[in-house]
Amino acid sequence: MLRIFSHPSCLAHDPGAGHPECPERLIAVAEALRAGLPHLLWQEAPQALRSQLARVHDAQFIALILDHPGPAPRRLDPDTVMSAHSADAALRACGACVSAVDSILAGNIERAFCAVRPPGHHASANIAMGFCLFNSVAVAAAHALEAHGLSRVAIVDFDVHHGNGTQAIFENEERVMYLSSHQANVYPGTGHISERGVGNLVNAPLPTGCDGARFRATWRERLLPALAQFRPQLLLISAGFDAHRLDPLADLNLEADDFAWLSSELVAIARRSGKGRIVSSLEGGYSLAALRECVVAHVGALAASPA
């Protein structure tokens, strides 16, 4: 069983007119999921607790986001802007991922998709960047380790931009494996093959123009075998769909079927090693047409019953 976690507050985060990370993204995702997968249940996300955020974020940074909003809009870097409701949206995004972990590990559901924004995978322990405030997937991974006592949590990231924040948070944490495919030589400039952490990082930069065949081969030959060998008890996904050929912020040429294929492969590994337990959370994807198609393909594959 798969459940979708979301909250209306995630629509109230407003980086400003013309910003690619706009509320319309989440509207498109919700409309597509309700139309394409109408049988799925939706659950309202709670706010994450400060103690949950503090497992991966510095106290001063948490206070910067939550306690000193100042006049809105507030620009944290050239791309990352807070509006009056951004802090609540970020708390709900983290809360969705934490609540999904709790529900799955309690045995109430098998998998979850968090239809939330702002995205999170660029946020590090003390820096908001790349449209991201708090790192929702990192908060969820730390929660699985500390609150539930898991010893092997994997994070798969197929966003076209490398999740530098997630990598930085866990690069010395042997209990967490981070695996990423991303376009080479674009923002944020990290994610080289040589970045191995304590043996828990697997990066696979993709060349400009990479198509689905090469994307699938990269995962089949390099990333999926490493994930299977790690045998995660819980699999978290940073689900960005900006590697699609229509996306305006990148230059890869994937189709929705490529995301569906990878999602099915991830389900198979999760079933073998972690009772099928997966939490996926929305990251990038800035073509609304591609986002609608890709999210239904991804969530549909996650929700599919065993063959």
Image: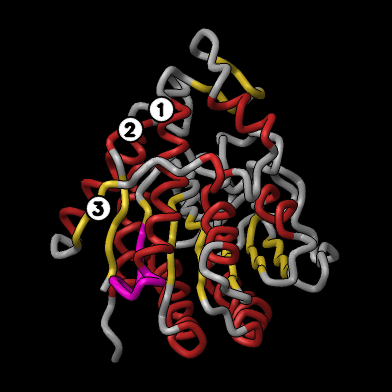
Give the CA distance from mark 2 to mark 3.
13 Å
How far apart in space, not on screen, are marks 1 and 3 (Cα)? 19 Å
Q: Residues within 10 Å of mark 1 (few under 14, many from 20)?
A: many
Residue drawn at x 76%, y 46% as measured from the top left: 189
Quadrant in which the N terminus appears:
bottom left
What is the secondary structure assignment of the residue under circle 2?
Answer: helix
Callouts 1 and 2 close, C-beta under 8 Å: yes
Callouts 1 and 3 close, C-beta under 8 Å: no
Residue holding disc 3: 43
Residue at the image position 71 percent from the left and 59 percent from the top = 170
Residue furthest top in the image: 71
| Element assignment for label 1 | loop
Q: Nearer the viewer, mark 1 or mark 2?
A: 2
The image shows residue 37, relative to residue 15, as above or below, that is: below
Quickly name the residue at label 2.
9
Q: Position of residue 225 (x, y in %)?
A: 64, 85
Quick check: 281 left or right of 34?
A: right
Rendering quarter of residue 199 = bottom right
- The three-letter amino acid code for the residue at tag 2 is Ser
Counting from the top left corner in percent of width and height, residue 114 is at 37, 53
Q: Secondary structure at mark 3?
A: strand
Quarter of the image that includes the C terminus: bottom left
Q: Is disc 3 surrounded by few (<14), some (14 to 19) or many (20+) residues within 10 Å?
A: some
Q: Which residue is mark 1?
A: 13
Task: Tell me the distance, in whole angstroms, between the alpha carbons under discs 1 and 2.
Answer: 7 Å
**Earlier along the polypeptide chain: callout 1 or callout 3?**
1
Left-right relation of 205 to 212: right
Rendered image coloring scheme: secondary structure
Find the magenta span and give its range.
104-113
Question: Count the marks: how many?
Answer: 3
State left or right for residue 15 relative to residue 76: left
Residue 221: % across, % down: 65, 83
